[in-house]
């Protein structure tokens, strides 16, 4: 009966597509265009249960569809699930899947595909770094740790079109979370056929979203990924673009000057450096911005000198904060906290929930005493030379110079700065080749901005290895409501109190589109970009 209903539904949709043009419906001038976007790096994999890099998240968001999608305000709207309901405690959610949801090979997407995806993401043998958002599901952490089998995870398929998810704690906004990549479905039979290559090449990808990899040439490794509009997608909204192209560094597309790339139509949208914002505005290019990057001092906790907490605290206590703030970059705002003003936790603004909890480590007269105590603990007779990395901008160099003056006076030793391009600065911090750096940390959805400081995070800017900090993050991920907020606050304050990261200012991230380009939805906090309704008028 279910298969019959699916066939009838598909037939009805096909008839509607044939009928509508004959009714004199005006064609959307912006539709059926190829939308071009530039990404910094090639995706390591297009496996939704494993991928973590930003370029992969973009492509996965176009190739796949979860139980829900997000609207322009970040609220859950129907995806594969046409509706959902929750119990009074918001701990059990029932999703009703639409009957015309199919994979790119025409086979139906079923509740079992979501069960398999959730279980596979959390299975210890998968070793997924992307699985942490699933910790909200009942028994997820125990499954991930291997102390419970995957069939004990709180997710079940009551039938082909009904999925029930039990949570560890109340989470009223859980449907919005299911729009994230790790929650995307996975067809078990197809996965097994790929023999360990799932998500790594065209023939090992089976998608269910608005776009597909059309053929074996669609993924030109190191150069570009071309996604074409899916013939089988039947979501609530029709897909506007004919295709998406994600260019990479190995392509012939020159994005050294992002504005030139936009105005020559080499790309239709691109991340924009702050120094080009004014010019883009003069040219009338549409710009979207979010105040979602926290800049401050990162201390390399694995450095022979900076590993000592008292030395780090002494240096922070000696900073003349008001003098530093005199050199804020243009459009920057003073940062009282590590987690910025746009971060969200369980569907609500994190900072509004957190209130005026303890922020950065305050200036004080005990800096010299702390430094001397730290040197004694390390067995150092005196303070050795230290280099501070910073962006090669006038304001950054003036700010760091204020730091050097204070620290040279404090220690009687020579501190120096090494200005560099932001791209090189990020590489140096990512590789751990630094002592102190004025750098930015980039937020993630639902409080995971702090996750970059986890001991096992490859992007850990301070190379922090703290079991105490890791326990606080884990406690936050395994709880909800006030308990989660409390744990995140403790984790945030740990970083400040132990002088791991000293926040100074918030900066915006910027995205620009070419003239006539519409419908691209950029999301803050690394939540991706939606191209479903992207269009352009030539």
Image (spheres, rainbow, N blue to C red):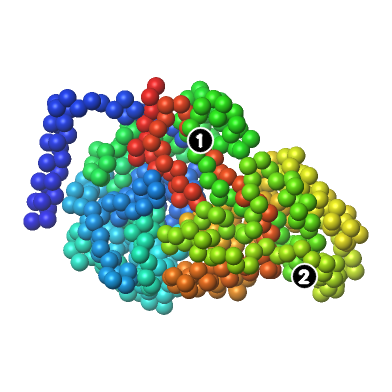
Identify which residue is drawn at 43% across, 56% down: 50
Label 1 close to label 2 by CB (< 8 Å):
no
The residue carrying pointer 1 sits among few (fewer than 14), some (14 to 19) or many (20 or more) residues within 10 Å by Cα, namely some
- Label 2, residues with CA under 10 Å away: few <14, some 14-19, many ≥20: many
Look at the picture and state if 200 lies above or below 375. above
Is residue 35 or residue 303 the one in the foreground? 35
Give the answer, above or below, for where 294 lies relative to 90.
above
Residue on which the image places disc 1? 287
Q: Determine which of the numbered discs, if any, sits on residue 310 in the image.
A: 2
- x then y, percent, for residue 446: 47, 60
Front-most of residues 187 and 436: 436
- Nearer to us in this view, 479 or 226: 479
- Quadrant housing the N terminus: bottom left
Q: Position of residue 175 (x, y in %)?
A: 33, 59
Could you tell me if residue 452 is visible in this image?
Answer: no
CA–CA distance between discs 1 and 2?
44 Å
Q: In terms of image quadrants, where is residue 332?
A: top right
What secondary structure is marked by label 1?
A: strand
The disc, 1 or 2, on the residue closer to the chain's N-terminal end is 1
Q: Nearer the viewer, mark 1 or mark 2?
A: 1
- The residue located at (80%, 53%) in the rendering is 403
297 in relation to 26, above or below = below
Q: Position of residue 182 (x, y in %)?
A: 39, 57
Image quarter where the C terminus lies is top left
Q: Position of residue 281 (x, y in %)?
A: 55, 30
Q: Which element is circle 2 on?
A: helix
**Residue shown at 64% from the left, 58% from the top:** 336
């Amino acid at each position: 009966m279910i298969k019959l209903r699916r066939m009838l539904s598909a037939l009805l949709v096909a008839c509607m597509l044939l009928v509508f043009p004959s009714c004199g419906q005006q064609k959307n001038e912006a539709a059926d265009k190829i939308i071009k976007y530039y990404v910094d790096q090639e995706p390591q994999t297009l496996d939704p249960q494993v991928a973590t890099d930003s370029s992969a998240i973009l492509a996965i968001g176009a190739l796949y569809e979860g139980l829900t999608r997000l609207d322009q305000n970040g609220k859950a709207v129907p995806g594969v699930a046409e509706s959902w309901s929750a119990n009074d405690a918001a701990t059990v959610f029932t999703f009703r899947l639409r009957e015309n949801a199919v994979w790119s090979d025409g086979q139906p997407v079923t509740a079992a595909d979501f069960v398999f995806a959730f279980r596979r993401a959390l299975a210890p043998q998968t070793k997924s770094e992307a699985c942490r958002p699933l910790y909200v599901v009942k028994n997820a952490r125990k499954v991930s740790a291997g102390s419970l089998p995957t069939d004990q995870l709180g997710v079940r398929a009551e039938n082909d079109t009904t999925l029930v998810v039990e949570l560890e704690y109340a989470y009223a906004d859980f449907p919005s979370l299911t729009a994230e990549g790790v929650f995307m479905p996975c067809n078990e039979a197809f996965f097994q056929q790929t023999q360990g290559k799932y998500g790594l090449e065209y023939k090992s990808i089976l998608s269910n979203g608005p776009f597909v990899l059309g053929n074996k040439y669609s993924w030109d490794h190191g150069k570009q990924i071309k996604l074409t509009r899916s013939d089988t997608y039947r979501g609530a909204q029709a897909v506007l673009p004919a295709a998406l192209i994600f260019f990479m560094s190995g392509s012939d597309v020159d994005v050294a000057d992002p504005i030139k790339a936009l105005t020559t139509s080499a790309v239709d949208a691109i991340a924009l450096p702050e120094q080009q914002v004014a010019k883009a505005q003069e040219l009338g290019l549409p710009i979207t911005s979010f105040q979602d990057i926290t800049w401050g001092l990162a201390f390399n906790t694995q450095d022979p000198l900076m590993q000592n907490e008292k030395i780090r605290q002494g240096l922070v206590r000696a900073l003349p904060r008001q003098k530093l703030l005199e050199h804020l970059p243009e459009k920057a705002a003073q940062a009282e906290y590590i987690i910025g003003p746009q971060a969200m936790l369980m569907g609500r603004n994190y900072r509004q929930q957190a209130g005026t909890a303890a922020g950065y480590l305050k200036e004080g007269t005990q800096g010299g005493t702390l430094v001397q105590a730290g040197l004694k603990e390390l067995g150092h007779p005196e303070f050795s030379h230290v280099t501070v990395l910073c962006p090669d901008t006038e304001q950054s160099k003036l700010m760091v110079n204020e730091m050097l003056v204070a620290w040279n006076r404090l220690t009687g030793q020579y501190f120096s700065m090494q200005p560099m391009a932001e791209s090189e600065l990020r590489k140096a911090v990512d590789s751990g080749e630094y002592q102190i750096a004025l750098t930015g940390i980039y937020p993630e959805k639902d409080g995971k901005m702090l996750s970059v400081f986890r001991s096992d995070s490859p992007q850990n800017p301070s190379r922090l290895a703290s079991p105490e900090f890791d326990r606080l993050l884990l406690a936050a991920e395994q709880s909800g409501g006030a308990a989660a907020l409390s744990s995140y606050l403790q984790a945030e304050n740990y970083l400040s109190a132990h002088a791991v990261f000293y926040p100074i200012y918030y900066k915006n991230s910027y995205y620009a589109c070419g003239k006539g380009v519409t419908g691209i939805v950029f999301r803050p906090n690394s939540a991706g970009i939606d191209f479903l309704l992207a269009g352009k008028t030539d």
